[in-house]
Image (cartoon, rainbow, N blue to C red):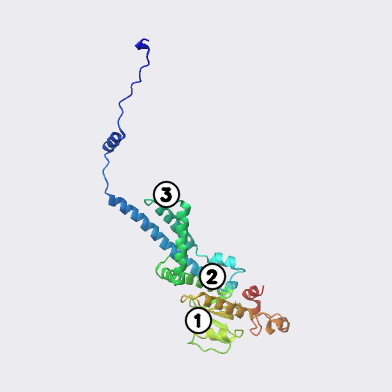
Amino acid sequence: MNDNMKPQPEQQPNQTSIQDRVFSAIDEQKVQPTACYVYWCQNSAMWLIWLATVVLGALATAVLVFTSTYRYYDIYEAMHDNFVTFFLQALPVLWVVAFIVLMAVAVRGLRATRRGYRLSPVVVGGSSIGMSVVLGLIASSLGFGFVVDKTLGEYAPMYHSQAEREQAMWQQPAEGRLIGEIDTTTITTDTYITFVDSVGETWVMNTAELRPKDKQLLESEQTVRVLGREMVAQSDYFHACGVFPWMLDKKRPMKELSAGRKENIDSMYSHMDTPGTRLQEFEGKAFDEASADNVPSMKICAEIAAVRRVGE
């Protein structure tokens, strides 16, 4: 067979090795070597960011546990029809948002570490949240939630602590709520005392329907919360129906909060179906068109919304 008829091998271009191509790219891009400690520092920084976000998430959890526990044992009947609406109003949204953001940063930071990319986002996120929750529960049991909330309230102008939110909810005289203390510089009687609220307003307070325990608490000169009714017919006149201690002066155990709520509910429940309530219709007829605001002898505590909610 004619050799010219044989297929000729294709001419291959000059092939270079992978090593040569790499060195050529390094030379063209003028890549400079970086010391290994730089990568070590970057990796360590990612771990520190993850750890910091977990710790901050734990503090956020501790504050959430503290505020939620206090809300659960508070006398929400004084302000809302049910616990759900009350909790949603009092929910510390800032801490909820902070927790979510911190956990997102923690997940991103851990996956950016040397071997973190191998881990599933679900595993990374679950471990970060789990550690924050566990540490937060421990911190809350040690009182860190109360301390963090109180400290931020004192030194962070834009932050409103639980005590500040509680004071704002209770300083509502038109809705039958006051917070403050007795004025011992004025003359008091068995029925009337002078009360100074949290904004400095002075009230003449009728204590005729208070239980002996409530009167003792009111006369103890400590900050208290008072539930009752603002009298329309008389200026700066308040009819007291229940006195409750101020619970945000220190960290209180759950057992004490539970006992306090029970006692507070019993205090409101005691105003229901009293002899004065049963005679109210007859007293109203006797006084013709006189209103409860003008007739202090009439029992009015059984008619306030908080007492009615307890009985429902």
Q: Can you say which quadrant of the picture contains the C terminus?
A: bottom right
Q: Tag 3: Cα neighbours inside 10 Å, few (<14), some, or many (≥20)? A: few
Residue name at image x 28 percent, y 50 percent: 36
Instruction: Give the number of callouts.
Output: 3
3 or 2: mark nearer the eye: 3
Which percent across, then down, holds residue 156? 41, 67
Mark 1: which secondary structure? strand
Q: CA distance from mark 3 to mark 1?
A: 61 Å
Relative to 98, say whether 189 is above or below: below
Along the line of sight, the residue nearer the viewer: 7 or 92: 7
Q: Secondary structure at mark 2?
A: helix
Residue drawn where x is 61% and y is 79% of the image: 266
Q: Residues within 10 Å of mark 2 (few under 14, many from 20)?
A: some
Farthest residue to the top: give it: 2
Q: Indicate the secondary structure of the residue bearing disc 3.
A: helix
**Mark sitting earlier along the chain (3/2):** 2
Residue 27 against residue 50 in the figure, above or below: above
- Compared to 194, does 96 lie above or below? above
Q: Position of residue 49 (x, y in %)?
A: 38, 57
Q: Amino acid at mark 3?
A: Arg
The disc placed on residue 241 is none
Residue tagged by mark 2? 71
Query: Which class describes the residues within 10 Å of circle 1: few (<14), some (14-19), or many (20+)?
Result: many
Name the residue type under label 2: Arg
How far apart are the alpha carbons under marks 3 and 2?
A: 42 Å
Circle 1 sits on which residue?
A: 181
User: Can residue 233 be seen from the camera position used here?
Assistant: no
Label 3 with label 2: CB-CB less than 8 Å: no
Distance between the alpha carbons at the discs numbered 1 and 2: 23 Å
Q: Can you tell which mark lies on residue 118?
A: 3
Q: Is residue 27 left or right of residue 205?
A: left
